[in-house]
Image (spheres, coloured by chain):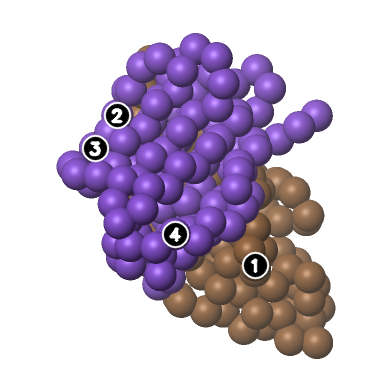
């Protein structure tokens, strides 16, 4: 069974500092990995995904994530945090399948608080 | 370029009533997923549907919950005889047909169900 762990319930960072939101995964075979952001009382917005190729994936709003196969991690990063980045962040994983359907498994979410 | 639409955004029901949640997928998408979000529990998969077909309902409670995605019209998640424990945010996502897992799910704004 596939799973996602987001080890930190909350991450606090000062505005302008770099931020990292951690994610590790477990899946049979190779993974597809996703990051979503959820603002209060809103749905999830897609940020970025890793499919194949370059381990560093760039996404929306200046976010990027690095796939590390040996550590089974896909940490989300941003060089300089903004107060408006404060939100709930979800990591998700899906096993690679040559065809057909694979369920996506989401982490429990990490609350990011950017302090002015 | 309308995204995933859900209605109602907020729904209040008394115990024992029925709740109907609607989801219109993004234009061009024929695959719909329903998730439930409870505080402190993250996002839980419920069901995956194509038009006129349930593909995976492994996350659906066996009783009182049902889902459909008819040939015409939105997908419906139906909860019969609601109980207070059904209070949650219900999110719908849509995607293009599966392509080995690469496809991205796009989420609607959610329906927040409150059972009194």
Please tell me if label 2 and label 4 are on a single chain.
Answer: yes
Please tell me if label 2 and label 3 are on a single chain.
Answer: yes
Q: Which residue is mark 1?
A: A40
Q: Which residue is mark 4?
A: B13
Colour in which chain A is drawn: brown
For the point 29% across and 52% down, the residue is: B81
Please indicate, yes or no, whether residue B20 appears anywhere in the rendered image: yes
| Viewer-side residue, A82 vs A72 | A82
Q: Is residue A89 above or below residue B64?
A: below
Q: Check contact, mark 2 vs mark 3: CB within 8 A.
A: yes
Q: Which residue is mark 2?
A: B56
Chain shown purple: that is B
Dot 2 or dot 4: first in sequence order is 4
Q: CA distance from mark 2 to mark 3?
A: 6 Å
Q: CA distance from mark 1 to mark 2?
A: 29 Å
Percent across and percent down for residue B41 are 37, 66
Q: Label 4 crowding class (10 Å Cα cut-off): few <14, some 14-19, many 20+?
A: some
Which residue is the extreme one toward the left?
A: B62
Q: CA distance from mark 4 to mark 3?
A: 26 Å
**Disc ID at residue B58:** 3
């Amino acid at each position: 069974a596939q799973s996602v762990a987001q080890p930190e319930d909350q991450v606090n960072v000062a505005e302008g500092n770099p931020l990292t939101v951690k994610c590790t995964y477990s899946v049979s075979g190779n993974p597809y990995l996703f990051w979503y952001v959820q603002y209060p009382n809103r749905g999830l917005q897609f940020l970025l995904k890793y499919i194949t190729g370059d381990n560093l994936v760039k996404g929306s709003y200046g976010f990027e994530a690095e796939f590390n196969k040996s550590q089974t991690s896909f940490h989300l990063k941003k060089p300089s945090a903004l107060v408006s980045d404060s939100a709930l962040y979800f990591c998700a994983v899906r096993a690679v399948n040559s065809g057909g359907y694979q369920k996506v498994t989401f982490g429990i979410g990490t609350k990011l608080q950017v302090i002015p | 370029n309308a995204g995933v639409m859900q209605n109602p955004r907020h729904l209040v029901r008394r115990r024992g009533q029925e709740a109907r949640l609607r989801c219109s997928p993004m234009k061009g998408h024929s695959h719909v997923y329903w998730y439930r979000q409870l505080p402190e529990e993250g996002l839980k998969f419920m069901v995956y549907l194509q038009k006129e077909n349930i593909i995976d309902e492994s996350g659906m409670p066996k009783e009182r919950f049902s889902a459909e995605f008819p040939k015409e019209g939105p997908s419906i998640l139906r909860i019969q005889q609601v109980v207070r424990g059904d209070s949650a945010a219900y999110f719908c996502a849509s995607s293009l047909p599966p392509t080995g897992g690469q496809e991205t799910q796009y989420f609607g704004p959610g329906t927040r169900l409150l059972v009194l």
